Image (cartoon, rainbow, N blue to C red):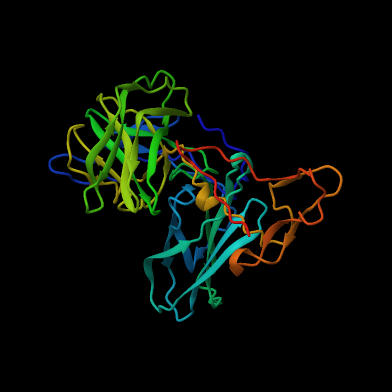
Amino acid sequence: MRKFITLIIISFIVTNVTELFSQQTIKDYKSILQRNNIPDSKETGNNFSGSSSNSDLRNNLIDSVEITAIYCLGSIPTTFACFDTLGIRVKKNIAGSYPVVIKIRKTDSIYVTIDSAFIHISNNGTYDTLLFYKIPCTPVLIGGLIYHRDRIIVEALSGELLNDNSSSVTVYDTEENCQYTTHDYYNYKDPCVNNDGGFGFNGLTGNITARFNNYSSYVFPVVAVEHGFFNSLGGGNQPYKIVIYGDNGSGKPGSLLYISSTLTSPAGNGSSQTVSHTLTSPVNISANSRFYVGIRQNGTTNAGLSFQNENPVRSKSFFYSYPDTSNTWIDFSPGNNFKPDIAPVTGVVLYESILQEGFTNLTFPPVSWNIEYTGTNYWTRNAVSSYGNGSGSAKFDFWHAPNGTTQFLVSPVITSTTQGDTLRYLYT
């Protein structure tokens, strides 16, 4: 089970949402993905009633422009999934000729802005639109395999404050999402926010999957799948299997690439519990391809796969089918507002693309590198580079070092990933 380092808590968190999500007609059935009945939820007929607790400190005035949702991965493996697409759902509530500016900031854990972009929208009327922006990947520290933590903050600003006293209007709205830049796993789950509950099928068997993209030119070998379950005391202990699918060419699950033996969900304890399944053999996801990872609920009791609320849920990302042998896949959108907590994991760390040290920074040795020596240190940084391509190199002054001098320039720890791995370097 993966352990995370402490994260900065974001400014507001939505918790304890007990609403049953809106239903849609599918053949002769109503929507069958349902949240399990966690403590404090109330059931009335075919619907749950309840309310959301929101610690948003803004006032109750109507926002002239608001961010209703932002969509991105919560954990993104560098090399394999760069660059992630940020989806921004923008709603303009007050008609007017003022421009709308969407400001995107990607900050690290100490609130230093590492990326910022502005999107200008000119529209006089009210509207609801979805914008997309490619967010850059943040470099990952290699020594100790430390994950980088970012906060993606999206702000909606209007260009004019409406002074009409008959309209209660503000001109500012913001949403944010935490994101890990990792070496080896994907997940949609926001790592700064607790899971909201569990969901599955009531009275039926079926499959639940999340879509992932290998954008790289490398194979992504899935070696394990981490996932969570959320069940009340007395619940859980339900049979399920891990499934991995390829793409059918149209953005939905296709051929079955892997199915595990029958597993059992943990006994419920009223909170989310993360478990991990190691595949019997790796599933190699081809370069530049889509794949789908999820669970197959074998029994007819709700399995309680952990989720976070996402309303409205993003489209073309989460799919389900029923019964468990069905290959007819249904998009969660619209109405099934569950963001599953499931993470495909690889043991591969591509240092060929991650650990590329050109010694261009004036700081020497570089961060996470060390020099081991006694007496006089003959290692220095030089502005001349190999073949004149670049602006730096590491220099050992062998002209002046006495015979028998042994000194070391030590890189961060490099763990072998596959048989036959090699280390290459340029020297002149």
Q: In this view, does 181 lie to the left or right of 315?
A: right
Of 94 and 156, which appears nearest the observer? 156
Near-viewer residue (77 or 200): 77
**Residue drawn 28% across the image and 33% down it:** 258
Residue at 26%, 37% (x, y): give it.
257
Where residue 122 appears, x then y in whole percent? Answer: 43, 79
**Image quarter hosting the C terminus:** bottom right
Residue 324's spot in the image, x, y percent? Answer: 21, 32
Taking the view exactly as shown, the residue that stands out farthest to the front is: 403
Would you place residue 194 above or below residue 401 in this image? above
Q: Is residue 267 above or below residue 290?
A: above
Residue 43 is at least partly visible in this image: yes
Task: Answer with left or right where residue 372 lies relative to residue 259.
Answer: right
Q: Position of residue 222 (x, y in %)?
A: 38, 38
- Count of numbered circles on the image: 0
Vertical order, 251 against 196 (above or below): below
| Near-viewer residue (193 or 422) | 422
Residue at the spot x=52%, y=56% of the render?
Answer: 137
Q: Residue furthest bottom?
A: 97
* Residue lying at the far right of the rendered structure: 375
The residue at the point 47 percent across, 22 percent down is 269
Q: Position of residue 317 (x, y in %)?
A: 33, 49
Residue 342 makes an appearance in the image: no
Of all residues, the one furthest to the left in this rendering is: 28
